[in-house]
Amino acid sequence: MEVSWKKYAYTFLITAVIFITAIYVSNYFSQKRINEIKDIESQISIDISASETQFSLLSELPCREISSSLLSKELAALGDKLSYMEESRGSNDSEVLSLKKYYSLLQIKDFLIIQKIKDKCGSNQANSGIFIMYFYSNKGDCPDCEREGFVLTKLRQDYPELRVYSFDYNLNLSALQTLISVYNVEKKLPAILINEKVLYGFQSVDDIKNALPALKAIDAAVAKAAMASSTKATSTKAK
Amino acid sequence: MHLVSEIVIYIFLFIALYIEVFFLITYFEFGNKGNKISTSKVPSKWPSVSIIVPVWNEETTVLKTIFSLLKLNYPKDKLSILIVDDGSTDKTWNVVQRFAKSKQIKLLRKENGGKYTALNYALNFVNTELVGCLDADSFVHPEALNRIVAQFEDSEMMAVTPSIKIFEPKGLLGLVQKAEYIFGIFLRKVFYHLNAIYITPGPFSIFRREVFEKIGGYKHAHNTEDMEMAMRMQKNGMKIGNVHNAFVYTIAPTSLKTLYKQRLRWVYGFLKNSIDYRDMFFKPQYGHLGMIVLPAAGLSVVSTMYLFGAMILNWINSLIDKIKEISTVGFSFRNFNLDFFYINTNIIVFVSLIAIIGTIFMIVNSRKLAEEKNKIGLDSILFLLFYTMLSPIWMGKALYNVIFVRETKWR
């Protein structure tokens, strides 16, 4: 029986080419994702700058003219994409890290501009500043962070007007560290900042609703609207 | 740990792809060249042939088996049939009595001792040039024998294997097995080109009688005597052929339980015989059989179990995550958004995709060899979907039995 080493070598070559192509294609798509995130980030950055500029220019104008662009949805979607990338490329990937830093920075900027609007116009406007700041860690030292993440995802789904700013406590970003020291957030994670008060440890949906009455107000408004429409429906039926 | 398991998966994928590419290259290399010769050839002389039918409690199928042999398109004076009743406890012996006066058929009876003893007992009565075996749950195509005999015109050919198909497949398991057997036809063809056939299947493999004179009769061989015989022949440098259109139809297990038992016996037998013949692995003197085919068959058991285990772990993990989520925030439907961003573009996905395309190509070609009408059938799809789920059941148990030394039973 003969063995054709040449054939084995050719087979190896073909297999290797297929494998390398697969690696190349996979990397190509991964890089494409990074670029997509970069694009979104720069778009959001432009939007925030525009809002800031608008704010400075029109500081004398009535409130309804300001706060035109609302970024919370885009920021949230960006956050989702970023955490997906973090999972697939690893949280130590340098590109993921720099995107994450930029994302944190954008969140802080968004927070600041919303605060400015709130100060000037008060908080009676819808969308004008119900927010939660969430500090987590994915270094394995925060067993409750996963569950807290579920809670916040659920809240964001139920209340699109709620802004959830999430920060990796361990991220090496000076602006973030300043924010942490301004609010005196200790490293007892998960930590949630609501109305200038820091809550430590796991908070359920109800805990957060209790701490943030604005959410309950939205619930009440929705219930009222539902009731109104159902009475309207019954009254139309009666006709 | 996560990184290690990922690297192991890459290694398995690379080797699996290597083997697939190797088989496809072999198939292309020989192309249809071999196929045509075997279909058009008619033997120029008709060597004498004996077919041994070992029976054990097979009263319902044995007649059909014998009738299919009698209908073979082969000179009657050149074909004799030996029925060996291996101590049946049902009416098998009575049922076969109707052939007691036939010149062509010889009836033998012995105490129960297992299939290999029945075969060896019958071999004592054989004096024809060629000898084969047909299990009593199988039926032959009328042209099967003359197509096989044609390949014996090569004087070096010591045994020739047929193509096995499922007799009237029914249900999910029947269809999955149908596709599996058809796929087997492709593989056996490739192995033949590589001179690396390592099983001479119980249903209708034909040998030169001198094989048994030179290397001895059948052995117990962990209840897979048909594999051991082929391995012993390969070890002794005897050539084993294959005729892809010499069809034999076999009755497949219809319940998961009987299928499980059959496969457990096969995989266990394969593993144990591989251990017995371990000195053939990675030895260039045994050609492609030693270098590629046997290691590939062994690896397929290990890698199937590993990948299956990894998949189950993955499922359990996502299930735990889901339970955690439900217990914290209750049941909620997340609005599913079809964003291209979230499509998995991992390397494993692309390599698997290529491997699946290769497999589909093999399936299409195996159906051509098996003379099926359509390029792809429902059975092929069910095979692709379910086979990887089914096989780990018996592979896992067979591995367990080998490691913890437990014999498997025939029935």
Image: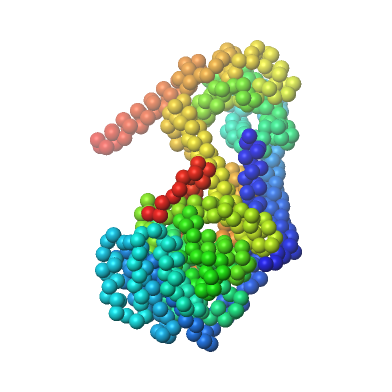
Labels in figure, total:
0
Note whether A125 is above or below B34 in the view shown: above
x then y, percent, for residue B329: 46, 27
Q: Locate residue B37, reporting x and y percent.
A: 57, 80
- Res. A45 visible in picture: no
Residue displayed at 54% across by 83% down: B41
Looking at the figure, which quarter contains the C terminus of chain B? bottom left
Identify the colour scheme used: rainbow
Residue under the point 67% across and 63% down: B287
In percent of width and height, residue A227 lies at 35, 28
Could you say which is closer to the camera, residue A51 or residue B62? B62
On screen, residue A76 versus residue B372, left or right, reads right
Please indicate, yes or no, whether residue A200 appears anywhere in the rendered image.
yes
**Quarter of image, res A220:** top left
Residue positioned most to the bottom: B44
Quick check: B70 above or below B27? below
What's the residue at 64%, 59% (across, down)? B290
Which of the image's four quarters has the N terminus of chain B? top right
Against A135, residue B52 (above or below) is below
Instruction: Tell me if B333 is positioned left or right of A46 in this view.
Output: left
Viewer-side residue, B40 vs B341: B40
Residue B115 rendering spot, x and y as whole percentages: 41, 61
Query: Which residue is at the front of the view, A136 or B283?
Result: B283
Q: Residue at x 42, y 73 (%)?
A: B125
- Residue A147 lies, with reference to residue A74, above or below; the image says above
The front one of B13 and B206 is B206
